[in-house]
Image: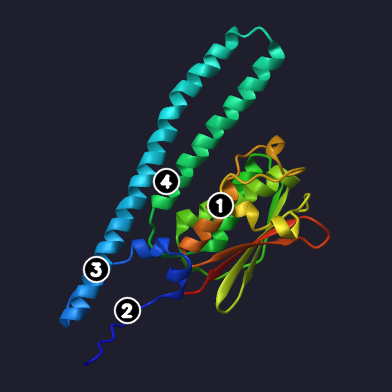
Amino acid sequence: GSTLWLTLPLDPDRLEHPTSDLDSPPLDETGPREARQAAHTFNLMQHRIREQVQQRARMLGAVSHDLRTPLSRLKLRLENINDDKLQGQMRQDLDDMIGMLDATLTYLHEQRTSEALQLMDVQALVESLCENAQDQGADVQVSGHCAPLQVQPMALRSCINNLMDNALRYAGQAHIELQDQREQLLIRVIDHGPGIAADKREAVFEPFFRLEGSRNRNSGGVGLGMTIAREAAQRQGGQLTLAETPGGGLTAVIQLPRH
C-alpha cells in the first residue's frame, strides 16, 4: 500500500512555549482526505485544550476574587481581639493572603492577554519607566542605546517593571542597561543586593517560590513577579535569565530577538 506523509509547520518557539500555540490559527482543512482528517483532529484538540485552559483561568479568577470578601471581613473582626501581638500576627497573615490573591488575579489576566507585536522605541520606554521610578524617590539609573524593534508593549513594560521592583525591593537600587546587537536587544536589570545562589536562580521563576534568608517575605512581595516577568518575555519570543552581578548582586537579562 501507499504511505501518506502529513507535514505540519512546527515553530521551535511554539514547541518550547506551547501557550502561544493555543492562540495560533487553525490548520487548513483542505487537501487529501487523510490530511483533512488529521488537520480536523488537530484543530479539535487545540480547541478543547484552549477551552480547558480558559475554564481553569476563569475558575481560579473567580475563587481568587470571591475570597477577598471573607478575608476583608476577617480584617474588620480583628479589631475585637485585645491581644495586640496576636492581632498584629493575624493581620500580617491576612495581608499576605490578600496580596497573593491580587498577584494571582494579575498573573491570570496577563496570561489571557494576547498582544500584537508593534515597532516600538524601547529606549524611550525604559527611560520613561526609570523617570517614573525616580519621581517616586527610587534610585534607578539607565544607560545604553537601542534602535526600535518589534515588541509587545504592555508585556515588555510588565516585564521590566517587575524586574525593577524586584531590584529595588532587595537592593534599594537598580541600573538598567541597554545593549543593542544585530540580531537581538539585551536589557539588563542590575542590582548590588544580596543576590541569589546559582542553584536557586531557576527556582525563583516558579509561582509563589520564596527564598530563605535575605530575599524572603520580610522584604515584601508574594513570589509572582519573576514568574510574570519571564512569561512576559517569552510571549514575545524573548528569554529572561538571571546571573550574578560582578562584585555581588543579581543581574536579570532580557533577550529580545529582532524579528
Which residue is identified by label 3? 41
**Residue in the image at 75% along x and 61% along y:** 244
Circle 1: is it few (<14), some (14-19), or many (20+) Cα within 10 Å?
Answer: some
SS at mark 4? helix
Which residue is identified by label 1? 227
Residue 131 visible in the displayed image:
yes
Q: Amino acid at mark 1?
A: Thr
Query: Disc 1, disc 3: CB below 8 Å?
Result: no
Query: Left of 9 or right of it: where is 27?
Result: left
Residue 218 image-quadrant placement = top right
| Alpha carbon distance from label 1 to label 3 | 33 Å
Is the image coloured rainbow, by chain, by secondary structure, or in one colour?
A: rainbow
Query: Disc 2, disc 1: CB below 8 Å?
Result: no
SS at mark 2? loop
- Residue 109 is labelled as 4
Q: Amino acid at mark 3?
A: Thr
Select label 2 or label 4 by which is in front: 2
Q: Amino acid at mark 2?
A: Leu
Select label 1 or label 3 by which is in front: 3
Where's residue 145, x and y in %? Answer: 62, 67
| Alpha carbon distance from label 2 to label 4 | 31 Å
Q: Residue furthest front?
A: 1
SS at mark 3? helix
Where's residue 5, x and y in %? Answer: 28, 86
Q: Which circle's residue, 2 or 4, is located before the other in the chain?
A: 2
| Alpha carbon distance from label 2 to label 3 | 13 Å
SS at mark 1? helix
Which residue is identified by label 2? 8
What is the quadrant of the N terminus in the image?
Answer: bottom left
Q: Amino acid at mark 4?
A: His
Q: Which circle's residue, 2 or 1, is located before the other in the chain?
A: 2
| Alpha carbon distance from label 4 to label 1 | 13 Å
